[in-house]
Amino acid sequence: MIAYLKGTIEEIEQDALLIDRGGIGFRVYVPATLLDRGVRTGDQIKIYTYLNVKEDALTLYGFSGRDELEVFKLLTGVSGIGPKGAMGILSTLSADDLRFAVLSEDAAFIAKAPGIGKKTAQKVILELKDKFSLEDAVEKKLAHGEAAAGIAAVSDSSVIQRAQGDAVEALVALGYSGTEALQAVRRIDVTEEMDSEAILKQALKLLF
């Protein structure tokens, strides 16, 4: 119904933003990670929204990007996790971190979210592991810029991304968590001459 809101931040609450759009104030519940980015009253903001409809309430949840919104929707589809539970997870883990935790079956990492026990975390993994692919997770992480630090600028970045993805996949197969694998790979100054094996060898040196 409401795909996104673009307006002025009038108030910042503990877990929500009050956004003025054309003289109408919308209360939008947002992840703590968004509030931690230093948003201020008076700022202009565009936020992608999810409208949760209940018999006695209409609640808007908002996210800074479409990707985070899509992950939120996937989480609400997990049995036993409603919008509040999904928001709690995304207030603790980024969408990127959640993808890697699911792919590496790291239930303990997901269970760091408030109100999410190990059994619920395992349910998240079971129901979402077929929704994500490692290649897509790596590409999104790189696209978001969170894994770009230390990577040299080169003419053919797609080749490097594939090599990095292969190296991450190999590390996960060796038993490292997705988060550990990605952190090791992104610490390497990758050049276009390096293949996935070369990246893997350097990453293993960092992990030992």
Image (tube, helix red, strand yellow):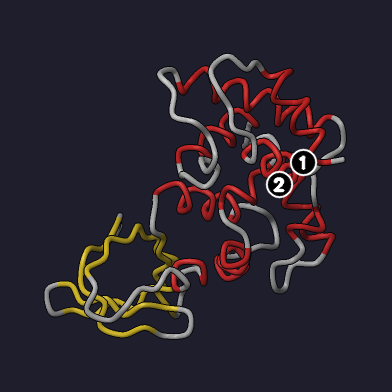
What x and y, as percent, mark residue 102?
Answer: 72, 45
Q: How many marks?
A: 2
Nearest the eye: 73 or 108: 108
In the rendered image, residue 138, in percent from the top left (x then y), is placed at 58, 34
Question: Do tag 2 and tag 1 residues touch (Cβ < 8 Å)?
Answer: yes
- In the rendered structure, the answer to whether residue 118 lies left or right of residue 38 reads right
- Please give left or right for residue 179 compared with residue 161 in the image: right
Q: For numbered disc 1, what is the local secondary structure? A: loop
Q: x%, y% of residue 73?
A: 52, 52
Q: Relative to residue 22, is residue 171 depicted above or below? A: above
* Image quadrant in which you'd find residue 172: top right
- Residue type beneath disc 1: Ser
How far apart marks 2 and 1 lie (CA) works out to 8 Å
Residue wearing tag 2: 179
Residue sitting at x 41%, y 85%: 13
- Image check: 14 left or right of 171? left
Would you identify the image quadrant in which residue 1 lies?
A: bottom left
Q: Relative to the observer, which residue lies in front, 117 or 182?
A: 182
Mark carried by residue 104: 1
Crowd band around label 2 with a 10 angstrom C-alpha radius: few (<14), some (14–19), many (20+): some
The image quarter in which residue 85 lies:
bottom right
Image position of 125 with respect to 198: above or below: below
- Which of the marked residues, 2 or 1, is nearer the chain's N terminus? 1
The amino acid at mark 2 is: Thr
Residue at x 47% of width, y 44% of height: 145
Front one among 27 and 113: 113
Q: Position of residue 170 (x, y in %)?
A: 77, 26
Asked whether 174 or 53 is in front, the reply is: 174
Quadrant housing the C terminus: top right
Q: Residue at x 62, y 27 (%)?
A: 164
